[in-house]
Image (cartoon, grey):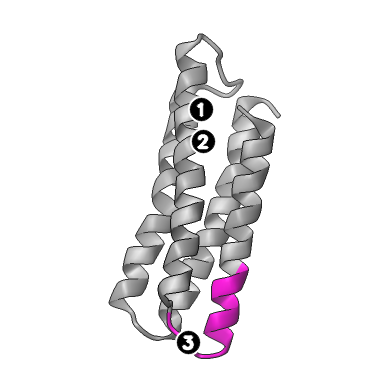
Amino acid sequence: MLDVLTLVTGVAALLLGGWCGWSASRDQPTKDWHFIGMAVVSVLALVQLVVGVVQLSRGEKPEQGTTIFVAYLLGALACVPVAGFMSLAERTRWGSVTVAAGGVVLAVLEVRLYDIWGG
């Protein structure tokens, strides 16, 4: 795995989580700008998925197993978009809380992906 990409994705997810947490503390729902931020973080997770699959196809293997690695990659890809869709259903501050939680979960998944790969 590319350590820099994992770090950038994790930091971006934490920034998104903090931003949406700030909006929730001000009693605001998710706004269009939040969805742009979610799109950026989701694209980073998609790039990470592609890089991971390419490395697996080259014969590189994660230390803790390919199956769990791919499962975590897919979970990381789905985490923020699912939180974004859930925030659309809840157009109160709790929608922002949901996205903030999704950002924190993605950051934790990034740490775990690093560990699974052998970091």
Q: Residue reaching furthest bottom?
A: 27
CB of mark 1 within 8 Å of CB of mark 2?
yes
Helix, strand or loop for disc 2: helix
Q: Observer-nearest residue: 99 or 19?
A: 19
Callout 2 crowding tier (Cα within 10 Å): few <14, some 14–19, many ≥20: many
> What x and y, as percent, mark residue 21?
57, 76
Majority secondary structure of magenta residues: helix
Q: Tell me which segment is drawn in magenta.
A: 18-29
> What residue would you read off at disc 1?
51
> What x and y, as percent, mark residue 37?
50, 62
Inspect the image, locate mark 2, and give the three-letter code of the amino acid beneath it.
Gln
> What residue would you read off at disc 3?
28
Q: Which of marks 1 and 3 is nearer the N terminus?
A: 3
Cα–Cα span, label 1 and label 3: 36 Å
Helix, strand or loop for disc 1: helix
Cα–Cα span, label 1 and label 2: 5 Å
Callout 3 crowding tier (Cα within 10 Å): few <14, some 14–19, many ≥20: some
Q: Residue reaching furthest top?
A: 59
> What residue would you read off at disc 2?
48
Inspect the image, locate mark 1, and give the three-letter code of the amino acid beneath it.
Val
User: Which quadrant, please, contains the N terminus?
Assistant: top right
Q: Observer-nearest residue: 46 or 89?
A: 46
In the picture, the disc for residue 23 is: none
